[in-house]
Image (cartoon, rainbow, N blue to C red):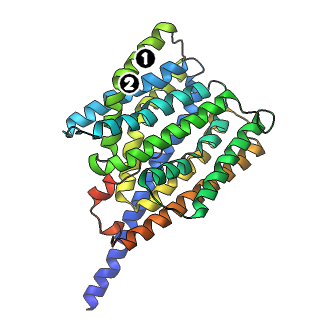
Amino acid sequence: MRDQSSATTVADPAVSDTRTSGLWWGLLGVAAFSFTVPLTRVAVGGLSPLFIGSARAVVAAALAVVALAVTRQRLPRGAQWPRLAVVGGGVVVGFPLLTSFALTSAPASHGAVVIAMLPAATAVMAVIRGHEHPPVGFWVAAGVGAFAAMAFASAQWGGLGQLHWGDLLLFGAVVSAAVGYAEGGLLARELGAWQTVSWALVLCSPLMVVLTVVSAAQQSQQGTLVQWAAFGYLGVVSMFLGFFAWYHGLAIGPMAQVSQVQLAQPVMSIAWAGLLLGEHITGTTIAGGLVVILCAATAVRARLGTTRRQADMTGDAGELRRPVRDRHDRADPRPT
């Protein structure tokens, strides 16, 4: 009995270490994604936004083809292809293109605050797509967060109601990504998490190749070495490698805890905007970011609480009893 007790005591730190490992992998993925907005701002200084938004997807698609071939992933079947088109339309086409055009005029710190709505927006789309019934607090938090983001954007351009065209593009990017992430979260249960993103990249690659050729023909890309390096990061890390760390962290879990690490992403992006781009981070930017992040955290937690209660009612023993592969497949690809 004493030996068994001793063995149990020794095993506890191992479980704790595993959970900590999941959080660290998740944080690594979020850190990789946090450079996306600042480096997009760098790249659009010398490269056309159409080229950046399309060519980065072409680079990522080439890497995805290699990864899928090497690991011998099976082809999606039947109705999975239209659903992949939804994922690709949101995270491969919509978000990269809209943010690239928006950041030609909007500062990176400004874009990071508006995009901080993404966790809450993804939760809303997941609720709608999954026919969930979250508490009123979820909708209140999501609504207040959206209003706070719009109020912040308006204040930056001269007052309430004075939204800049770049803000409309950023809001469109958030909606596009949220739709793609919500559908991707469901599809990942069938195909696997990083596999879903990879197949979406491959499916959208013909369109993105055409857009890349058109953008290159319309305008000569006269970027500096730094701007090309920023573009390379967007294609290799932001749209591909970052997902491997993020999904590995979600697979280790606990998924509910690891997924909330994403709320640190806009904070990091604002910090990089100040450190790397020399942008002046005003009190309004800090306050706006904190309010939006707080609302997003409240909405995400409310939805997670509802999901747990529904799982208990249906007899689900919980995430820890599921095999790692199953938890991996249920991963929700939120960051960008």
Instruction: Tell me if residue 183 can be seen.
Output: yes
Q: Is residue 93 above or below residue 14?
A: above
- Which residue occupies the foreground of this view, 193 or 78? 78
Q: Find disc 1 in the rendering and name its residue.
A: 212
Q: Amino acid at mark 2?
A: Val
Residue 120, horizontal then vertical, whole percent: 56, 51
Horizontally, residue 202 falls left or right of residue 96, namely: left
**Which residue extends farthest bottom?**
1
Image location (x, y in percent) of residue 155: 77, 39
| Mark 1 / mark 2, whichever is N-terminal | 2
Q: Position of residue 10 (x, y in %)?
A: 33, 77
Bin the neighbour count of mark 2 within 10 Å (Cα to Cα): few under 14, some 14-19, many 20 and up: many
Whole-number angstrom distance, CA of label 1 to CA of label 2: 8 Å
Is the residue 293 above or below the residue 69 in the image? Answer: below
Q: Which residue is mark 2?
A: 58
Expressed as whole percent of the image width and height from the top left, the position of residue 117 reads: 59, 46
Amino acid type at image mark 1: Thr
Q: Is residue 336 visible?
A: no
As helix, strand or loop, the secondary structure at mark 2 comes to helix
| Above or below: residue 238 compared with residue 290 | above
Residue at 29% x, 65% y is 322
Whether label 1 touches label 2, CB < 8 Å = yes
Query: Looking at the image, which residue is at 33% across and 41% down?
Result: 196
Front one among 307 and 6: 307
